[in-house]
Amino acid sequence: MLGLMAVVATVGSLVLLGCPGDSDHHNPAIASDLNNRSFTFSSGKVFNSALTNVSTVMSFSNNATNFALQATVQNVVRTATGTYDLDSCLFTVGNSTNPAAPTGGSDFPAGTGPQPNDTMDLSICDFDSTNNSLTVFDGTATITGVSRAVN
């Protein structure tokens, strides 16, 4: 009987605290989860409100310290690049209008996506290794992107 009570107490505490892979965002992404991967999101709203309902791809490189965000806007693939702070889930777009510049940047027209020097401060960046997905949350919306390896 004592053993059964211990099992019940353990299961109960896991339910209260959350388990890895749960929907309560307890799996913060680490560099090895993101590096050399890209994630396709059905909507880029969490990255920029102008990208609501626009398919968006977020790619990571350089040990997940750099990012590239791509979306098709006005029938042209647009890109924003910059640095990613894994500890704070903060994306900082470089200061150039040329995303290929050494410091990064954005070629999104004004009002259509991230601009040079913009920051995308997300409160949650969770990785699910079971389905290779990244779930991000900006305080208003949660969106999950599916991963594929980047060449």
Image: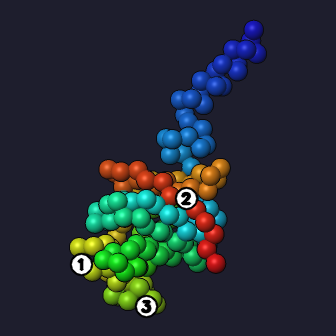
* Quarter of the rendering containing residue 113: bottom left
Residue 134 is left or right of residue 98, and the answer is right
* Quarter of the rendering containing residue 123: bottom left
Residue 82 is left or right of residue 52, and the answer is right
Sooner in the amino-acid sequence: mark 2 or mark 1: 1
Q: Residues within 10 Å of mark 2 (few under 14, many from 20)?
A: some
Amino acid under disc 1: Ala
Q: Residue at image x 23%, y 73%? A: 111
Residue 146 disc label? 2
* Quarter of the rendering containing residue 7: top right
Q: Residue at image x 52%, y 71%? A: 59
Task: Name the residue beneath numbered marker 1.
Answer: 110
* Residue 28 in view here: no
Question: Residue placed farthest to the front in the image?
Answer: 75
Task: Name the residue beneath numbered marker 3.
Answer: 101
Total numbered circles:
3
Horizontal and vertical percent position of residue 96: 35, 88
Sooner in the amino-acid sequence: mark 1 or mark 3: 3
Query: Gap in Å between the C-alphas at discs 3 and 2?
Result: 28 Å
Amino acid under disc 3: Ala
Label 2 sits on a secondary structure element that is strand
Amino acid under disc 2: Val
Query: Gap in Å between the C-alphas at discs 2 and 1?
Result: 28 Å
Judging depth in this view, the residue of 150 and 125 nearest the camera is: 150
